[in-house]
Image: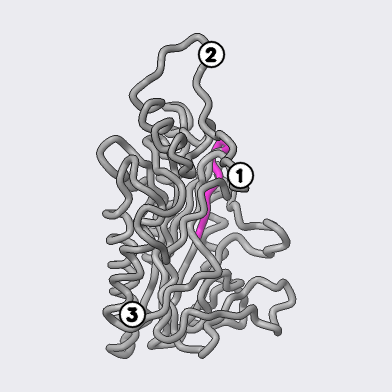
C-alpha cells in the first residue's frame, strides 16, 4: 500500500490563500516534496543573512589579498579570526562537532574540511579552497573560493575554472517553483563534458538561521526531483569537482575525522555561494 507523503506546507489560519500558497499546495497535492513554511525567510531574517554575507565576503577578500606561496594554512585561519573579531562576528566552523579551527583550507586532493595547520605550507602550483561561514547577530552566511598559488599546471587551472562554471550554471538552473534536482542535473551535465567527477557524499544546504537547514542541495540530480524551490528560501550551492573519480574517503591520519580526500588522490576544486531565492531567480548573498 502506498503511503501518502505527510503535508509540510501549512496555511495561515483565517488568512486567504496567497499566490505562493496556491503554487506550493499545487505541488504538495501532487505528492511532491515542498518546504515547510519556516524555511521561507522573513524580510528581517533576509536582512540579517545579507549582513552576515557582507562580513563573510570581507573575510575571503582579506584572505585573497594576503594568500601567497610559503604561508601556512594556520596563517589563513589567523586572518579569518582577526577579521571576525574586528567585525563583531563569529566563525561557525570553530568547535562545530569537534572541528578545531575557524576555516576550512583544502589543498589539491583534499576535497573539503581541510584543517589549518602551521605545518601545511602553500607551495607554487597548489590549488587551495578556503571555506568560511560567518555568524553575525545570530545569522549565518557561507561561501568558499579557490586560490591558485603562483603558476600551476593547465590541468589544474582548467579544473578550477570549470568548478566555478559549475557553480554559476547550478545557480542559473535554480528557478522559483523549480526543483532542487534541476541544480544537480545542470552541474553534472557541465562536469561530464570534461570527464570530471562530482562528489555525491557531500552537498549544499539550506542556511541562514542555522548553519545547516533543509533542503539538501545535491550536485548530481534529475530534473524535477527534490524539494520545490520557493521564494524566500536561502541555501548554498557548492559543487565539489574532482579531476578523476567522484569517490572520496576520510583521511585516516586526521585525528579529528574531518578531512575529505579524493579516492584516486587527484586534485579537487570547489566554489560556493549563499543564495536567496526570489520571484525572479537567485540573488547572491556572498562572494
Residue 222 is situated, as x and y percent measured from the top left of the image, at 38, 61
Quadrant location of residue 136? top right
Mark 3 and mark 1: Cα distance apart in space: 44 Å
Q: Is residue 66 above or below residue 126?
A: above
Queried whether the magenta region covers residue 282, the answer comes back as no
Nearest the viewer among 30 and 170 is 30
Q: Secondary structure at mark 2?
A: loop
Which mark, residue 159?
3
Quadrant containing the C terminus is: bottom left
Mark 2 and mark 3: Cα distance apart in space: 51 Å
Badge 2 is on which residue?
13
Badge 1 is on which residue?
3
* Local crowd size for mark 3, using a 10 Å CA cut-off: few (<14), some (14–19), many (≥20): many
**What's drawn in magenta, residue-wise?**
132-138
Dot 2 or dot 1: first in sequence order is 1
* Local crowd size for mark 2, using a 10 Å CA cut-off: few (<14), some (14–19), many (≥20): few
* 83 sits left or right of 148 in the view: right
Nearest the viewer among 64 and 103 is 103
Dot 2 or dot 3: first in sequence order is 2
Q: Are marks 2 and 3 in contact (CB under 8 Å)?
A: no
Residue at the spot x=46%, y=56% of the render?
A: 217
Mark 2 and mark 1: Cα distance apart in space: 27 Å
Amino acid at each position: 500500500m502506498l503511503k501518502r507523503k505527510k503535508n509540510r506546507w501549512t496555511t495561515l489560519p483565517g488568512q486567504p490563500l496567497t499566490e505562493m500558497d496556491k503554487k506550493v499546495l499545487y505541488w504538495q497535492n501532487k505528492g511532491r516534496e515542498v518546504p515547510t513554511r519556516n524555511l521561507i525567510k522573513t524580510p528581517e531574517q533576509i536582512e540579517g543573512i545579507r549582513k552576515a554575507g557582507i562580513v563573510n565576503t570581507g573575510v575571503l577578500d582579506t584572505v585573497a589579498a594576503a594568500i601567497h606561496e610559503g604561508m601556512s594554512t594556520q596563517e589563513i585561519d589567523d586572518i579569518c579570526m582577526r577579521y571576525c573579531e574586528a567585525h563583531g562576528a563569529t566563525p561557525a566552523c570553530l568547535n562545530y562537532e569537534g572541528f578545531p579551527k575557524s576555516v576550512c583550507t583544502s589543498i589539491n586532493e583534499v576535497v573539503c574540511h581541510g584543517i589549518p595547520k602551521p605545518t601545511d605550507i602553500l607551495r607554487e602550483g597548489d590549488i587551495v579552497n578556503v571555506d568560511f561561514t560567518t555568524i553575525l547577530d545570530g545569522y549565518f552566511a557561507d561561501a568558499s573560493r579557490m586560490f591558485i598559488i603562483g603558476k600551476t599546471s593547465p590541468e589544474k587551472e582548467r579544473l578550477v575554472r570549470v568548478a566555478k562554471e559549475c557553480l554559476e550554471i547550478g545557480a542559473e538552473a535554480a528557478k522559483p517553483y523549480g526543483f532542487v534536482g534541476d541544480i544537480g542535473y545542470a552541474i553534472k551535465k557541465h562536469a561530464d563534458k570534461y570527464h570530471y567527477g562530482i562528489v555525491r557524499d557531500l552537498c549544499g544546504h539550506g542556511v541562514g538561521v542555522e548553519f545547516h537547514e533543509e533542503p539538501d542541495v545535491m550536485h548530481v540530480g534529475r530534473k524535477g526531483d527534490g524539494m520545490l524551490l520557493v521564494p524566500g528560501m536561502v541555501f548554498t550551492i557548492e559543487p565539489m569537482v574532482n579531476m578523476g573519480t567522484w569517490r572520496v574517503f576520510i583521511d585516516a591520519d586526521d585525528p579529528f575525522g574531518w578531512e575529505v580526500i579524493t579516492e584516486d588522490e587527484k586534485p579537487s576544486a570547489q566554489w560556493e555561494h549563499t543564495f536567496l531565492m526570489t520571484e525572479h531567480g537567485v540573488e547572491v548573498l556572498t562572494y
